[in-house]
């Protein structure tokens, strides 16, 4: 059965679809074609169950109907049997419909779900990754176990990560290692971050209470936040923000005992390499956007009045309690 998974959004959404991709490959015993935003194609290629990856720039969420023409053309010419759509976009759903894929699955929601042959109740308040996994169970008749995301950083990235830790005096398993992503964390869009001062105080508390080593991770946009943290850091911290590519960052996180981050793709990358996480959520919902599983804790800011919640309402003690419950 030729199956395509169509994902719109960015790196976070692509990683949230990883359990679905793994489950479909397991159920059908064939690699799955993955159509995803171009910015997430590199990661998608190394997800368990992914076969060919079709990068489509218009799937980033900023696409227009004409730019989705490439997606229509590629799906049409492959003569696929099934399309599993991980998108609420009416344009994306219409494009898959127009490509004449015989069976089209998606979550219920909005008038555009009439374009699906199979509409599945994913639950409006459910974790999005678990909701998309329901599409796999529906297609397989319920015979799919709780598939997990798995990302392989590769031997080269793993070797670099190990050498970085050893050269900085960190031996594997010798002490508690906590990775902190103080900024955007390779997100496709700008992320609302917690203040660098609070991250620094958190790192100091982890070092004093648990003897933890702290590693800062992120892309070049996070350099400013990492530099601001240094003003209040009292403990030794390894800072790799802006120095490593995504694969090496994943390999480094895999060597850590925990990751702390706001609503960034690194939360899901941690889940995909088997590292527990504590996610900080304010304007966005941790219930739907965080990695699924008991090993991944959510610290959700409480709104003040009728406005959206701010991360600044999350205290250091709140995050520390989430971390200590995860250890």
Image: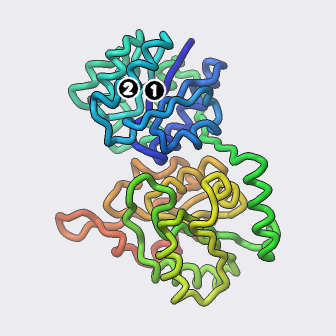
- Residue 52 vs residue 311: left or right? right
Point out the image quarter for the N terminus.
top right
- Residue 206 vs residue 316: left or right? right
Q: Position of residue 68 (x, y in %)?
A: 35, 28
Point out the image quarter for the C terminus.
bottom right
Q: Is residue 327 above or below residue 203?
A: above
Considering every residue shown, the one lying at the far left of the view is 306
Q: Which residue is mark 1?
A: 135
* Residue 80 makes an appearance in the image: no
Q: Position of residue 317 (x, y in %)?
A: 47, 78
Q: Looking at the image, do the residues carrying marks 1 and 2 touch, with CB atoms under 8 Å apart?
A: yes
Q: Is residue 260 above or below residue 313?
A: above
Residue positioned 46% across, 78% down in the render: 196
- Residue 175 vs residue 25: left or right? right
Disc 2, SS: strand
Residue positioned 36% across, 21% down in the render: 96
Q: Is residue 87 above or below residue 194?
A: above
Task: Using the rendered view, name the quadrant where residue 302 is placed.
Answer: bottom left
In whole angstroms, how far apart are the C-alphas of marks 1 and 2?
Answer: 7 Å
- Residue 146 vs residue 138: left or right? right
Disc 1, SS: helix
* Residue 232 makes an appearance in the image: yes
- Upstream in sequence: badge 1 or badge 2: 2
Q: Which residue is mark 2?
A: 106
């Amino acid at each position: 059965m030729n199956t395509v998974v169509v994902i719109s959004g960015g790196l976070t959404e692509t990683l949230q679809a990883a359990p679905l991709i793994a489950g479909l490959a397991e159920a059908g015993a064939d690699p799955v074609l993955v159509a995803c935003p171009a910015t997430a194609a590199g990661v998608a290629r190394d997800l368990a169950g992914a076969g060919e990856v079709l990068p489509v720039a218009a799937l980033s969420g900023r696409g227009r109907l004409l730019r989705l023409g490439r997606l229509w053309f590629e799906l049409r010419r492959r003569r696929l049997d099934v399309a599993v759509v991980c998108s609420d976009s009416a344009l994306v759903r219409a494009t898959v419909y127009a490509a004449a894929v015989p069976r089209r699955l998606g979550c219920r929601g909005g008038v555009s779900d009439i374009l699906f042959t199979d509409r599945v109740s994913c639950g409006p308040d459910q974790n999005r990754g678990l909701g998309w996994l329901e599409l796999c169970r529906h297609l397989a008749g319920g015979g799919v176990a709780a598939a997990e995301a798995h990302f392989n950083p590769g031997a080269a990235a793993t070797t670099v990560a190990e050498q970085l830790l050893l050269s900085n005096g960190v031996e594997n398993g010798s002490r508690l290692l906590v990775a902190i992503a103080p900024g955007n964390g390779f997100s496709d869009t700008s992320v609302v971050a917690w203040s660098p001062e609070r991250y620094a105080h958190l790192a100091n508390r982890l070092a004093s209470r648990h003897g933890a080593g702290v590693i800062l991770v992120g892309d070049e946009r996070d350099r400013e936040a990492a530099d601001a943290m240094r003003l209040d850091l009292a403990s030794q911290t390894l800072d790799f923000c802006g120095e490593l590519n995504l694969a090496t960052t994943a390999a480094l996180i895999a060597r850590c005992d925990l990751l702390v981050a706001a609503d960034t793709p690194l939360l899901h990358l941690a889940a995909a390499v088997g590292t527990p996480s504590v996610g900080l959520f304010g304007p966005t919902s941790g219930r739907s956007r965080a990695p699924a599983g008991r090993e991944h804790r959510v610290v959700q800011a409480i709104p003040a009045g009728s406005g959206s919640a701010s991360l600044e309402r999350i205290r250091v003690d709140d995050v520390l309690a989430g971390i200590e419950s995860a250890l």
